[in-house]
Image (spheres, rainbow, N blue to C red):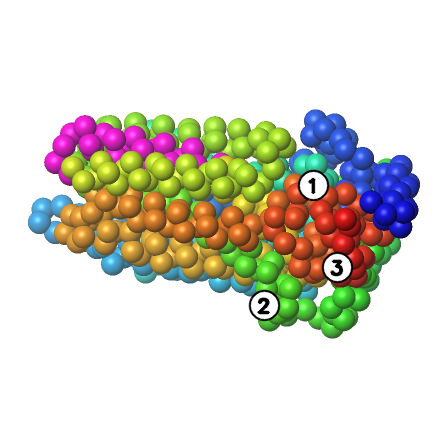
């Protein structure tokens, strides 16, 4: 190595030491390495705020399963069904409308969350989501016709989109660097917890003939907007939002409310202001941001990554898994065995989310996602092979078992993906970028929710276990795309990620870099604060 290069490296080491001496547990400081447990101990309030932020995922999981369970209740069928061939039957088109339009409303709510957050703040978006959810549940609870029930599902769907998108934005902006990945991946745990709570409330009431059976099920959904409204007065506004709106003093106060010492808050605030200012210098973005900015220049790479991450829930067969009970009955499995398999699947999903939270601190994001998609591809391949023997009882059991084993994939594939989606966007575009991601997520979900019944219904394609080949193929394609496009963001501050993505650092060059707030050495690349590749280190 040349003398100049040695001198340059020595300079970076000195700057790093000075930066580390003053740094702390932030998402943007070049802080010295801390264990996850140390970060949890030092940031108890932030942990609670992140649990609050993930309530949107819990609401979504609860709402997703509630309708499926209500459809199996006799009183619900009597209220909303029509008398056909000696029994009450809910027309298929109403079931499709309830599912599809609820997903479309969630998509629209996610889209609206971006400008709403940027205009009025993260707390205001939570408030609107809680009010809409309470109103939507009220309509659902009092509905006596399928049309009124649909109206309530649409209103509540808008609230879910707002709460989900706002929660991920908020968590990414208030969490310490060491905790950010775990906090964002808590999305999957809370969603599975929502499934479990819905099942716990509904299963003891399945045999009740009174309309109280399903009304209590829907009324229990009021708990979630109630929790949002109850704790909202204690929630600090995001310091990033306040800095972007020129309220630096208020941002400093919010940092102290998040549990940081006064001296620590000053350094944190300086990091946030510097990151925002450097981004404006690079993009000349003093003007108000728009959704179009997400698809321009280097931001298009960030948006692609966010879209990939949001597509993965359908790549691993999320719509297939949530329709699993009906699919297994259609395939010939008894109701009792189907119920047992469903409960086991939800338990697998929760356990997978918890294990993933730990593994992310060891393995990072990228490797876990690739492992999860690879595992999903393997499981669905086995299911597809079993589906080639449709009239075999052992083959049916293989299909059912591997469908429920797929819940294990949810943690490693989706948890880290939600972490990366919350980390790679530009600071000024974070709310809008996540809105784009969640909008695509629920658009993709709507498509699959419409298509799935045609794939497994006995009067349509009746593919049975052969559906596994479809998801195995999607998984194989996704593995190739993710290997090329998906960067490792573990341990990266927002400032570092912003500079690296703006500079166009290749995906494979992300790991193993060191640097300082004034200049980064990224693999073979030196990235200056304005995000340009200024030289090569040999």
Q: CA distance from mark 2 to mark 3?
A: 22 Å
Q: Which mark is residue 201?
A: none
The CA distance from mark 1 to mark 3 is: 17 Å
Say whether residue 379 is visible.
yes
User: Which residue shows up at 15% across the image and 38% down it?
Assistant: 390
Q: Nearer the viewer, residue 314 or 209?
A: 314
Q: Which label's residue is closer to the chain start, 1 or 3? A: 1
Quadrant where the N terminus sits is top right
State the image coordinates of residue 100 (x, y, percent, origin top left): 35, 57
In the image, which residues are magenta?
390-411
Image: 340 above or below 463: above
Helix, strand or loop for disc 3: strand
Are the residues at dot 1 and dot 3 in contact (C-beta closer than 8 Å)?
no
Q: CA distance from mark 1 to mark 2?
A: 29 Å
Say which mark, if any, is on residue 295.
Answer: 2
Circle 1 residue? 512
Q: Residue 346: which quarter of the image?
A: top left
| 389 lies above or below 163 | above
Tell me if label 2 and label 3 are in contact, CB under 8 Å. no
Q: Which of the two discs, 2 and 3, sits closer to the camera?
A: 3
Question: Is residue 397 magenta-colored?
Answer: yes
Q: Is residue 399 left or right of residue 532?
A: left
Q: Which residue is mark 3?
A: 533
Which sits in the foreground, 237 or 396? 396
For label 3, count other residues whose C-alpha is less than 10 Å away and answer few (under 14), some (14-19) or many (20+): many
- Residue at 43% in and 40% down: 374
Q: Nearer the viewer, mark 1 or mark 2?
A: 1
Residue 116 appears in the rendering: no
Residue at (74, 72) in percent of width and height: 287
Give the mark nearest the N terminus, 1 or 2.
Answer: 2
Left or right: 339, with 102 as reference point: left
Please provide percent x and percent y for residue 30. 80, 43
């Amino acid at each position: 190595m040349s003398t100049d290069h040695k001198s340059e490296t020595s300079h970076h080491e000195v700057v790093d030491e000075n930066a580390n001496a003053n740094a702390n547990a932030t998402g943007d400081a070049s802080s010295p390495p801390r264990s996850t447990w140390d970060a949890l101990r030092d940031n108890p309030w932030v942990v609670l705020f992140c649990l609050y932020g993930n309530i949107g995922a819990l609401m979504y999981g609860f709402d997703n399963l509630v309708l499926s369970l209500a459809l199996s209740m006799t009183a619900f069928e009597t209220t909303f069904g029509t008398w056909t061939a000696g029994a009450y039957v809910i027309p298929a088109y109403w079931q499709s409308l309830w599912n599809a339009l609820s997903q479309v409303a969630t998509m629209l709510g996610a889209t609206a969350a971006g400008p709403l957050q940027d205009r009025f703040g993260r707390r205001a978006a939570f408030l609107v989501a809680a009010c809409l959810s309470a109103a939507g549940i009220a309509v659902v609870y009092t509905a006596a016709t399928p049309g009124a029930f649909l109206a309530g599902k649409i209103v509540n769907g808008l609230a879910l989109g707002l709460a989900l998108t706002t929660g991920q934005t908020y968590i990414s902006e208030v969490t310490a660097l060491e905790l950010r990945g775990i906090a964002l991946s808590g999305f999957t745990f809370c969603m599975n917890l929502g499934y479990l709570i819905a099942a716990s409330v509904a299963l003891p009431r399945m045999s009740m003939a009174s309309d109280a059976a399903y009304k209590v099920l829907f009324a229990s959904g009021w708990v979630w907007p109630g929790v949002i409204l109850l704790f909202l007065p204690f929630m600090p506004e995001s310091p990033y939002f306040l800095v972007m709106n020129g309220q630096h003093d208020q941002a400093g106060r919010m940092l102290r409310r998040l549990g940081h010492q006064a001296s620590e808050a000053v350094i944190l605030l300086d990091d946030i202001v510097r990151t925002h200012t450097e981004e404006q210098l690079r993009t000349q973005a003093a003007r108000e941001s728009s959704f179009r900015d997400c698809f321009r220049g280097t931001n298009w790479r960030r948006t692609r990554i966010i879209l990939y991450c949001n597509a993965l829930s359908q790549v691993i067969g999320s719509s297939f898994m949530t329709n699993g009970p009906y699919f297994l009955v259609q395939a010939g499995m008894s109701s009792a065995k189907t119920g047992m398999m469903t409960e086991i699947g939800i338990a697998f999903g929760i356990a997978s989310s918890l294990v993933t939270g730990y593994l992310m601190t060891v393995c990072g994001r990228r490797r876990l996602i690739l492992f999860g998609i690879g595992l999903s591809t393997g499981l669905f391949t086995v299911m597809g092979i079993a589906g080639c023997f449709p009239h075999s009882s052992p083959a049916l059991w293989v299909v059912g078992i591997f469908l429920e084993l797929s819940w294990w994939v949810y943690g490693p594939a989706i948890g880290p993906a939600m972490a990366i989606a919350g980390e790679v966007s530009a600071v000024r575009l974070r709310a809008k970028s996540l809105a784009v991601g969640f909008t695509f997520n629920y658009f993709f979900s709507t498509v699959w929710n419409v298509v799935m019944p045609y794939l497994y219904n006995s009067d349509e394609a009746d593919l049975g276990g052969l559906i596994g080949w479809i998801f195995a193929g999607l998984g194989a394609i996704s593995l190739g795309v993710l290997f090329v496009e998906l960067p490792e963001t573990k341990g990266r501050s927002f400032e570092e990620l912003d500079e690296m993505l703006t500079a166009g650092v290749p995906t494979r060059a992300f790991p193993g870099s060191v640097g300082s707030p004034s200049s980064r050495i990224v693999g073979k690349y030196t990235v200056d604060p304005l995000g340009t590749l200024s030289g090569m280190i040999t």
